Amino acid sequence: MSRDGWEAVIGLEIHVQLQTRTKMFCRCANRYGDPPNTNVCQVCLAHPGVLPVPNRAAVHQAIRVGMALGCTIPSWSQFHRKNYFYPDNPKAYQISQYDSPLCGEGVFHVPAPGGAFEVRLERAHIEEDAAKMIHAGGAGGRLTGSASSVVDFNRAGTPLLEIVTRPDLHSGEDARRFLNLLRATIVAIGASDADMEKGSLRCDANVSVRRVGDTALGTKTELKNMNSFRYLERGINAEIERQIGVLEAGDRVRQATMHYDVATGTVHVLRSKEEANDYRYFPEPDLVPLEPDAALLDELRAALAELPAARIERFVGQYGLPEPIAEALGTGSELARWFEELARLVGDGRLAANWTLGDFSAHLNAAGVVPAESPVTPARMAGLVRLVESGAVGTAAAKQVFAGLVDDPDASAEAIVEARGLGQIGDEAALAAVVDEVVAGNPAQVAQFRAGKVQLLGFFTGQVMRQTGGRAEPKTVQRLLRERLDGS
Amino acid sequence: MATFSTLGLTAERAAALLDARELSCEELAAAYLERIAADDPALHAFLHVDPERTLEAARRHDASGRSGFAGVPIALKDLFCTRGVPTTAGSRILEGYRPVHDGDVVERCQDAGLVSLGKTNMDEFAMGSSTEHSAYGPTRNPWDPETVPGGSSGGSAAAVAAGLAPWSLGTDTGGSIRQPAAFTGTVGLKPTYGAVSRYGVVAFASSLDQVGPFALTVRDVAALYAIVAADDPRDTTNVGPAEAVVRPEGEDLRGLRLAVPRDQLTVGVDAGVLERFEEAVALAVSLGAEVGECTLPHASHGLAAYYLIAPAEASANLARYDGVRYGPRTDGPDVQAMYEATRHDGFGPEVKRRIMIGAYALSAGYYDAYYGQAQRVRTLIRRDFDVAFADYDALLLPTTPTPAFRFGAKLDDPLAMYANDVFTLPANLAGLPGLSIPMGTSDGLPVGLQIVGPAFSENRLFAVGHALERAIGFDPVPPRLQGVTS
Ligand SMILES: [Zn+2]
């Protein structure tokens, strides 16, 4: 994107809260919304003498995500301690991974309307989340300067997966598209609900710009606090623009942590110079290395469902759908499943795609439900599609039938058409009477039509539709109108 | 009730007295508590004793019927977490702290019916070789109150030597069981790394710490090891013993190939210690062992490697004592000041020294030269042992270069204090088991013989130790306590 002559280079660091029953290294519940400090024990409160025991389910989830993102899974990986003092970090070290992550390099394939692109992944590793702090008094909701702070350790020690990409993205839109598909992939395999607004998916972006053709990377800044896909895209684009502005003004970009202000749509410096943190990483001596064997990897790989990227490509091939349609249908597993069932029932992928992305998606958005929660099952929907295709129900009436499917979960499309009299009127005699009435009632328009203003045919059609409650069969109406208006 | 003294009383003998109903569990516990009440004010082996709690536990065993070692008392180093019972690790920073959980070995002792007499003194966070670094004052050596009992498990060793407990548990990170065992004329085992769970042991250096027993005999040490060694899923570095523990019976060493790493004995070894050692080696030969020589070419770097690895791990392990969640807090104007004041007031000088060394060894730009290099040395030392064990079943070494030293002798010279561990810490670096048994005295103070074997060869160490113990015939009761009855 962006101005001529400049190229943006973007890498993302993504934190995903893994969905597990218990925390990463103890047996406390990994659950949100409970009263503060109720899901805690001696391990996650870092009492003396406690030891971490890795959560096998979390490790498996992480490996599955790594596989789904195309990462290699090394046969040997280990935990490191990352040392720093902060009240949200009970051991004063975070158990993380350093030079031997659970998931190694990979390539993630992103279908896109303008042609698919690839994003290389550097790594994905497991670590534990920090506790949650609330600061009272003072400025800016930060620890420094606050009158007092309280800590809720319910989140302390819950499993996180950190995914790091190579700097392969070049625009806010690319980043959003990549993250959206990554999110859908993680959701599809059930590793996390990956909800940016809830914080179960967090994303920081490293952004730099350079002249097109340059091979060296420019100075990068780290962009934080983007809690939705929209803000991620806008924040990155704003930072790209800012950096280009700085460089075009002859200045240089300074390494910094930036904050995107959603209210003003601008970025500003959060920390002007990265504090030289020395985390004194060293191998976690309380844990033995992780050595996933081939049998486990085979088992986890076999259990992976079809992933969104592959599904989108399949939709293009199997149903002959254009890429943007396939992307809209194939990204989310539930909608994809609903669509495929409808396509099977009506025997026409394009037709099913239209209905899925049309009335059905509008209904999901309006009702705020997911496909499985909707009363409109693919089978009931197929009933309506068949009525429309056979001409028994017109497009206008179809909207009312669809509304009936939503309102009355027990009724079939046929029953709704019957009960509400929404069947199409194809009977020529009945329609002729209405047409005659309309022609007789609008002499001025008839005169104009006959004088050459043929576009008035739409006006007459509309009048007939109005009088029949939208049920008139349009082709017959138009033929009858032409007969009346052209003749005599 | 039979007249008896806890002095020199083994756990095996105590259990036999209970089996024969010559004593009740309560009477046995009461005898030890009396001895503690009489002698511990001078000795200071214990940091915490709760007589009522102890007697109540003993009475339960009397009431419920008992078997094995049930009803036999035990003393626990104050490094083991005991639910509801003060656990200080010898530090001010845990003053008043009562754990919400029991350590794995504490649970296993309870399951075996052992009755806790209390928590024993130690160098703060197990950092030291004399108990002089305890925040609560030093423990004295029952053999000579002017000398140290060794450390860091000095309280556990002194309690057993002085008849305040028949046996006890300690921990050994660089010699903290074997060295005080040697100084107090007791038997001490540092098991193979991974044989005993570290869950509920206040951590000093995670990759080196191991729990082990003190007792008056090798057979008792084997019995207590059998109680505590197990696979505990709460410690992922722990696998438990590789085979069932065998309490030794045999009195000869036929068919065993032992080696003396002569290259280790060239400098700084006390003449009396060397004399006793050569006698022990000669005894081993007379018992039928084939005794050869080997070398440990990299062991001379062990001290330096150890004093980087252990402080590095400790610097992280002790970072949690920040005054936020438990333990004493010294307030300050902001959280950073609170951290600093709390840790300034809570830690003693030796702990601070090691935290600083450790943090430095791990810091950016120094990691490779210090921590990384130390780990490479560790690998080389492990290989030295592998080479030796290709030809020999076990190695013989003095446990320490000298007998117990006097209070204050090394307090101002950390390097001299650290050098006391020179023969013990290679086994920690290599994760190997080491057994120390008394091999006589030098200038009236006990000295120890160390037997080091391959990983999980504890049964072999017990067999060798038992045969030599019988042949040496050491009397574990300190002469100055002999004739004293309770
Ligand atoms: Zn917990």
Image (cartoon, coloured by chain):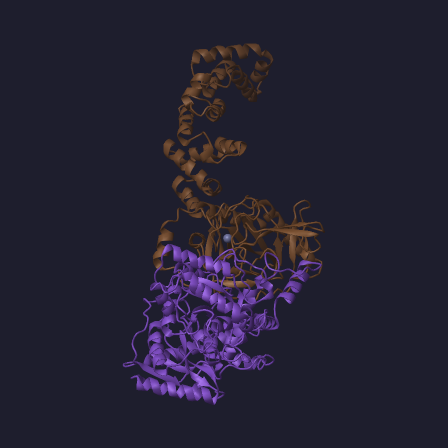
Instruction: Tell me if residue B120 comes above or below residue B412 in the rendering.
Output: above
- Residue A17 in the image: state x and y as whole percent: 51, 50
The picture's colour for chain B is purple
- The tally of labels here is 0
- Residue A79 in the image: state x and y as whole percent: 48, 62
A396 displayed left or right of B95: left
- Residue A409 in the image: state x and y as whole percent: 44, 25
Residue B377 shows in this picture: no
Residue closest to the eye, A81 or B184: B184
Residue A145 shows in this picture: yes
Instruction: Tell me if residue B6 comes above or below residue A368 in the rendering.
Output: below
Residue closest to the eye, A306 or B190: B190
Residue shown at the point (49%, 30%) measured from the top left: A359
Residue closest to the eye, A372 or B476: B476
Q: Which chain is brown?
A: A
Instruction: Tell me if residue A327 comes above or below residue A106 in the rendering.
Output: above
Instruction: Tell me if residue A127 comes above or below residue A442 in the rendering.
Output: below
Residue shown at the point (48%, 85%) measured from the top left: B444
A89 displayed left or right of B172: right
